[in-house]
Image: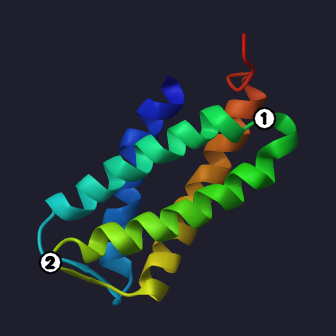
């Protein structure tokens, strides 16, 4: 559960940072990257539950990157925004860096072990 709480903060912040840093990621209101961040947080958490173990660290990280790219790109297309596919990739890279840190912490703390 602590992984989900962390993601609910980190994913929207990551998308907002991408909006600020990258010229090919543009949202018209602050609520758009926050909504996309929440969608990313829930999907990343579900993928952690299903995939993340000590031996599947990189599989989970790559799956997070691919899912984040597709979610950012396609959900952004449903809103009045300007996010190119390359912008979605850059946003996913930024989020993947935070995911690597979170995955390492979850594995080291034993929070990925199933009961």
Compared across the picture, whether 23 is left or right of 107 comes to: left
Compared across the picture, whether 64 is left or right of 113 comes to: left
Residue drawn at point x = 72 percent, y = 9 percent: 115
Residue at the outermost right position: 55
Q: Mark 2 — residue?
A: 80
- Residue 34 higher or lower than 3, as above or below: below
Residue closest to the eye, 40 or 14: 40
Q: Circle 2: is it few (<14), some (14-19), or many (20+) Cα within 10 Å?
A: few
Mark 1: secondary structure: loop
- Residue 55 higher or lower than 32, as above or below: above
Q: Mark 1 — residue?
A: 53
Residue at the outermost top position: 115
Q: Quadrant of residue 80?
A: bottom left
Q: Circle 1: is it few (<14), some (14-19), or many (20+) Cα within 10 Å?
A: many
Residue drawn at point x = 39 percent, y = 68 percent: 72
- Residue 44 higher or lower than 32, as above or below: above
- Tell me where residue 26 appears, x and y as whole percent: 25, 81
């Amino acid at each position: 559960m602590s992984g989900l709480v962390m993601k609910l903060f980190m994913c929207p912040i990551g998308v907002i940072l991408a909006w600020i840093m990258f010229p090919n990621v543009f949202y018209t209101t602050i609520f758009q990257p926050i909504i996309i961040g929440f969608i990313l947080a829930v999907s990343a958490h579900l993928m952690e539950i299903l995939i993340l173990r000590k031996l599947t660290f990189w599989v989970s990280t790559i799956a997070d990157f691919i899912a984040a790219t597709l979610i950012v790109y396609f959900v952004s297309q449903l809103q009045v925004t300007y996010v190119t596919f390359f912008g979605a990739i850059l946003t996913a890279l930024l989020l993947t860096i935070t995911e690597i840190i979170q995955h390492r912490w979850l594995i080291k703390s034993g929070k990925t072990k199933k009961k």
